[in-house]
Image (cartoon, coloured by chain):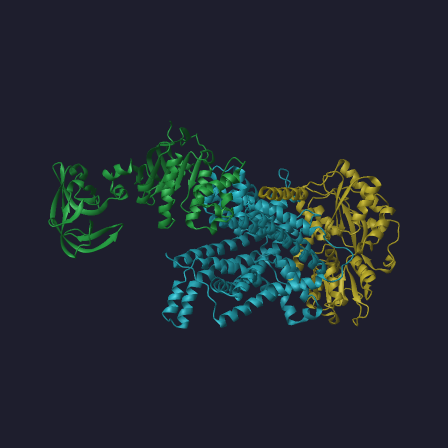
Amino acid sequence: MRRVIAAGFGVAIIIIAAVLLWPAPARGLVLYAALDYAPAIGKAFTKKTGIPVRVIRLSTGALLARITAEGHHPDWDIGWFDGATAAVSLDTAGLLAHGLRPPVPLTATGRSMLPPDGAYIPTGFTLAGVFVMNKASTLKPPKTWNDLTAPLYHGVVGMNDPAISGPTYPALAGMLKQAGGWPQGKGFVAALKANGLQVFAKNDATLAALRNGTIKLAIVQSSAAVNVARNIDHHLTVIYPRPAYVLPNVIVLPKGLHGRALREAKAFIAFVESPAGQAIRKREGEGDSYYWPVTALPAPRHALPPLTTLDLATLDAARWGAREKTVLAWFAHAIDGAGS
Amino acid sequence: MAGLIATFFVYPLLRLLVMPFLSGHGAAGDWPAFAVSLLLSVGTAIVAAPLGALFALFTTTAAGPVARAATLTLWGLFLTPSYMLTTGWMIIFSGHALRATLAGQAFFGVGGLLMLYVVKALPFSALVARATLAAADSAPAEAAAIHGVPFIPRVRIGLRLLAPAMAVGFAIAVIETMQEFGIPATLGVTSHVPILTYAIYQHLAETPTDFAGASILCWRLIAVAAVFGGLAMACRRQGAAIQHGRMRPPARQRPARRRELAFAALTCLFALVGIVIPVAALFVRALQPLTASMPHPGAVLRSLGFGMVGATMSLGVAVLILRLRAAGARRMTAVLDVALVANMAVPGLVLAASYIVAFNNDLLPLYGTRLLLLIGYTAGMAPLALRMMQGALDDLDPNLVAAARLHGLPRLTRLVDIEGMLLIRPFTYAYLLVAAAIMFELPVSELLYPPGATPLGVAIVTLDQMSDYAASARLALFGLGAMAGLALLLAAGVALLAAPRRLRPA
Amino acid sequence: MSAALAIDGVAVQRGGRLVVEEASLGLAPGECVVLAGESGSGKTSLLRVIGGLDRPARGTIRIGGAVVDDAAATFIRPESRGLGMVFQDFALWPHLSVLENVAVVIRDRAGRDRKALALLDRFGVASCAGRLPATLSGGQQQRVGLARALAAAPRLLMLDEPFSSLDVETRETLRTELRALIVESGLSALCISHDPADIARLADRVAVLEDRRLTACTTPDAMFARPATPYAARLAGLCGGVRVPARGEGSDAAIALGSAQLAIPGGAARLAGAAQALLFWPRGALSLAAEGVPATCIGAHFEAGHWQALLRLDGLATPVPVQCAAPPPRGAVALRVAADRLHLFPFSG
């Protein structure tokens, strides 16, 4: 009896270990994605082409950290996330394949996002930082970034932590740029801090703080803002600041990808940019579906204002990507005091 | 065994720690994180050490329900994962009304950190002080009572006896607080206070990864642990000088009413702050209506699986090491003792960081695999497993094993029916403790988890960062439930195994 | 027929220190040898080496004629040596019932329980079969221990101070039972003890381990008649151990016992020039008489059926016990000494 139980325990452990450690099948593509419609795209791509795609969802920050940590031994075939500046950081670290060309014609905005060395392909864009407020709030809605330094916004403004939330660094970069660039723009952000700026981990946390009244104005990514105002809390409204900084979502491939894997990855990019792919992206995602396309059609989801009504600005991804570490270090030290 | 230690402990650590010297640059600006962490650790220890020593004295000398409740509370505080404790309190202070109050402001600053650190450090200090006091003699205190020594000198005698226990508790509290990662990881940026372990994590999360910067911080962390670890060992030796031959452990007595009331109040306070309130908060938040998707659905089972397999491996390694030691390999014993002391100074965070550096190459491309995560868990938990099994094996009468060999019992019978059954209870206890530690583990999980296979601790902290406390609370409670289920299953198994065969009627 | 046990030139180390040097001992089939020695003399270490739980530093060990350990390449594991062992602290497996403790040792699974029960019945503890060892008395536990040792059908039975944890009554009973068992079954047995009663009741021969060496290996009566060392004299049941001044006179030795000078025939060789000697004597060699060595009686006690008077003699630090028929009066008495029955051992201080 004892031996039966002991053997049973041993067998159970072996089975559990086997289940845990069983290697995933090597065939097909591994996609690290920070966009919520990625699993649907992966399934549809497999259905269309027969190429298996293993979709691994990570937050942008975790995805970038993981790609960096894997270094020159990547376990991924395709990376898909928000932020051209982040892609430039990866490229500076020598981790990305070069010479990628868009498989379909892009709009002018889309073409402006292309890097000279072809290290990434833009697949759409959102806006790095927009304002979200309660419709019933007595607070006067701000129009520009500088408005936020007014005493009337003291202690009621919140934003994400760029060290944790991947898409927030471009928002910070945008704030600095419109205030004179780097390092001149530091003064503006310091003024925000002096005016009681609160920092939360990510989009969801900042929006939760807005909804429970901790802050009255949230600066978050446009996709998260529109999603919460449209689908979760109809008391909220989105205000597009002047200027609003473009935040591309991009696809990257690891350096050294070749042969069949490279062909299959390129086929995936083509699917993503195709009308069928974009239709799935609009339909199957949550917040991330609220993006503006960089290809000729189709139209963005209803909730998004036409681009002509917005004051768009772009960031020089190469320059701001190169100084990301310095900016983040300064922000952490000067603004929220956590870490270095 | 030496090869395993070299591959999975010595080599990765050396590789990480040597980086600042190779790359030439470092984290010169990280001194605030180090200084604040050290100050907080010392501050925590100043509170936790005397309280821990007093709790230790009370729980080892007092009889009655309050003493039992105090012991249970200490174990509850010890076993509760720190990030769950933090999540519970964050749920309470996430409401706007409370957040705006003085308490709310304090919670998201130094005050909250200190409170959480003290709650987590107290059981460590108390348990270590208990071990020191267990070897102490009651005769000097009894002599003081019998000879009618006045109160203040009697307190001084008592303090003199308690001093080694307090000193060891102080050193341990500093080390544990310096190495604590769950609390700062959960509070993250909202606490506005720079913390060393969180700074290490941030260096590793940067693009490009700043290994040299992380390494310098690891050096500082290890240095502090080494200094206070040495202090702890010296205090233990000093404590031994007070003991003498013919010692009697103190007999348990029902304490005086005032003393019992005081400890009842303290126990209630810590039970409330450290267990009841945060767990209640988790329960209440978890009961909110389910959202459309349940994030990280597999995290609980996955981490439970890792816990079970990791505990098996850790205890297996521990038993192997102890057998080697018993076989009298002196050099091996010396190597192991050094490795164990080193492991105390090197927290899981640093070990995991070293694995990222060491196993991301062509020869050993293990980074990003579940295997490396499992190895990281095992390497991190092996010393705990070793300490627990050492105690069990020390208590085992060697003649029982000798009798089995001399009477020609087959090897399998000896292993299962004799040695196995003799050790089944302490083994099961150690197994559950290690499995729970792995299941709820955070730093190694955070750094080594394969993408797409999020461990429980990482999932909870990630949900906290999104302020999705309902999902986080649910995961936490499911995790606790799963571990409780495992404990019940194993307890039933042990009861079945340990029951002697009944004599069938002729 | 080959010896049940033969150890030849065996040396045993413990903690880097030599605890047994050059021990040689043989055990004939059916013989019971008691290995005696003071605490820490190396008895248990020697037993562990015979059992295969440790290895000797030098020498050869044979069981049933076969080499089981030659301190080199040859080593037969304990479980294959055909041994049975009874322990001082019983060493019953606490989680197994009494029946399981005995049954698990029986190799042949067929009818295991029946055979175990029969053995337990032989030792009078069959009624405890379903109980756990912790619920039994010390005597009962040791009986179970004996049953277990026999259940292994051993070629050699080893006993490590088997009765020292038991009360006097149980000791006496078990000693008698064990002796009967050994004699009737023809089992060879090696028993460790420092209790003279064990030697008297169990031993066919006595081996004495002193100062890391086996100083004697003889029958109890031979040891009684000619003890090799003071310790052997004590074990054999001789009285005394009194320190007296002594000197050699030709081939004889002269000792000062109180105010009297006594000649010990042939004692000079034994004395080997020492100025002091330890004196031992069998009961009756010293007795109270009308005339003899002057002494003072300071008290008396009754022990094992006899009165023992305690006498003070001039020049002797310790009082001398003397057997007598009736309790003597306190005060001056005379001591008669049969000098030819005294045993003398040199004492170097």
Image side of residue B91 versus residue A131, left or right: left
Q: Does residue A273 appear in the picture of this structure? A: yes
Task: Indicate left or right for C265 with A118 as reference.
Answer: left
Measuring from the top left, give residue B299's x and y in whole percent: 69, 51
Query: Nearest the camera: B350 or A325?
Result: B350
Give how far across and how far down residue B462 sits, in percent. Answer: 69, 56
Residue shown at 66%/71% (left/top)? B101
Q: Colour of chain C?
A: green
Provide the letter of the chain coloured yellow: A
Q: Is residue C14 visible?
A: no
Left or right of C345 on screen, residue B383:
right
Is residue B168 or residue B485 the one in the foreground? Answer: B485
Against C231, residue B31 (above or below) is below
Q: Colour of chain B?
A: cyan
Residue lying at the far front in this picture: please name it: B506
Q: Position of residue A7 (x, y in %)?
A: 61, 41
Q: Nearer the viewer, residue B35 or C157?
A: C157
> Percent from the top left, x then y, of residue C235?
28, 43
